[in-house]
Image (spheres, rainbow, N blue to C red):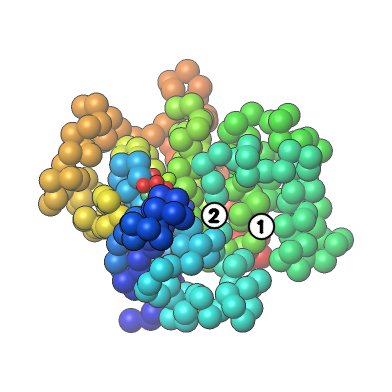
Amino acid sequence: MSPALLSLRDVTKSYPRGGLIDRVLKGTKPFVALDNVSLDIHRGDVVGIVGESGSGKSTLASLAVGLIAPTAGDILLDGENLAELMRDHAGPWRRRIQMAFQDSSSALNPRKTVELCLTETLALRGVAREGRRQEAHELLALVGLGAELAPRLPHELSGGQRQRVGLARALAMRPDVLFADEPVSALDVSLQAQVVNLLARLTRELGLTLVFISHDLALVRTLCSRLIVMRNGAIVEQGACRDVLDNPQHDYTRLLIAAVPKGLAGRRVGPPASSAGASILERKSPDPKKSIFASRRLAERI
Ligand code: ADP
Ligand code: MG
């Protein structure tokens, strides 16, 4: 079998606890945010990570995208050690793993227009100046936004639009794998459905490998093929998403499922009945050939 696209091997991340004086005088043990975690992500996987707040989900994502370094263990990209790759040629490797954040308003520069934010990212990827504007508009179309938003600043957009711009920016790098850390938690329910449906479409049409971090089991069920359940910095259970949700093996997973109001964990994500047409998953595109063609074209480039 080919090596996994991204692997964590016995990865631990700990943080010093308390102030410097405590540490020196009392020898306080460090706090372990991620405890000896191993996992493989293969091309085309859509992996959900769930677990209560503080269970280490964001720490795992930050390690995987190279924002922080592990205290112990290895992270491998296509079988090669990420720490070494980052040291030798950070640029190209950083590009391959992208992260979309929970709060896009703080992730976007408030003084840069949507178009500038995208064209600057495209420049980083090495796209020639004359092609950047066109590709920025294609990226906007890919995430369901019109070119009329290009001259706007982040505060002139709605929360859902900002979240899509954040996604477009991550996709501009043509990543091999996208980590989305609670990408819809800050949005209201109907917008959540739209963004999740958009992610579903991107994974289908672009073959994007996605790690979707969420505490919403219903969204995870809709989107993900695999599920990882975390608690106290460790993986307590993982497997095919439906198997884990329908037949949990671990008490903690049962607790998480039981905490969801009845019926919701099984609900399909869609728009409220009144806003017909907002769901990409459930709606046939008016001209599927055209939209698939457009995104194929982009897929070839991404
Ligand atoms: P989650 O995303 O699942 O809510 P996190 O990965 O953000 O959890 O955090 C896991 C634990 O690590 C939390 O208890 C958090 O307080 C702690 N932690 C995260 N980052 C730091 C840091 N820079 N310094 C100290 N502790 C941290
Ligand atoms: Mg988090």
Q: Which numbered disc covers residue 205?
A: none
Q: Amino acid at mark 1?
A: Ala
Residue 59, percent from left and from top:
42, 55
The quadrant of the rendering that contains the C terminus is: bottom right
Label located before the other in sequence (1 or 2): 2
Q: Which numbered disc covers residue 172?
A: 1
Q: Residue at x 51, y 22 (%)?
A: 275
> Taking 114 as reference, is 1 above or below it?
below
Residue 263, percent from left and from top:
23, 28
- Residue at mark 2: 99
The quadrant of the rendering that contains the N terminus is: bottom left
> Taking 42 as reference, is 216 above or below it?
above
Q: Amino acid at mark 2?
A: Met
Q: Is residue 56 left or right of residue 162?
A: left
Residue 62, percent from left and from top:
48, 58
In the image, farthest residue toward the top: 274
> Taking 282 as reference, is 23 above or below it?
below
Q: Is residue 300 left or right of residue 47?
A: right
In the image, farthest residue toward the right: 130
Q: CA distance from mark 1 to mark 2?
A: 12 Å
Q: Residue at x 26, y 35 (%)?
A: 265
Q: Secondary structure at mark 2?
A: strand
Task: For marks 1 and 2, give the one nearer the viewer.
Answer: 2
Q: Is residue 151 left or right of residue 283?
A: right
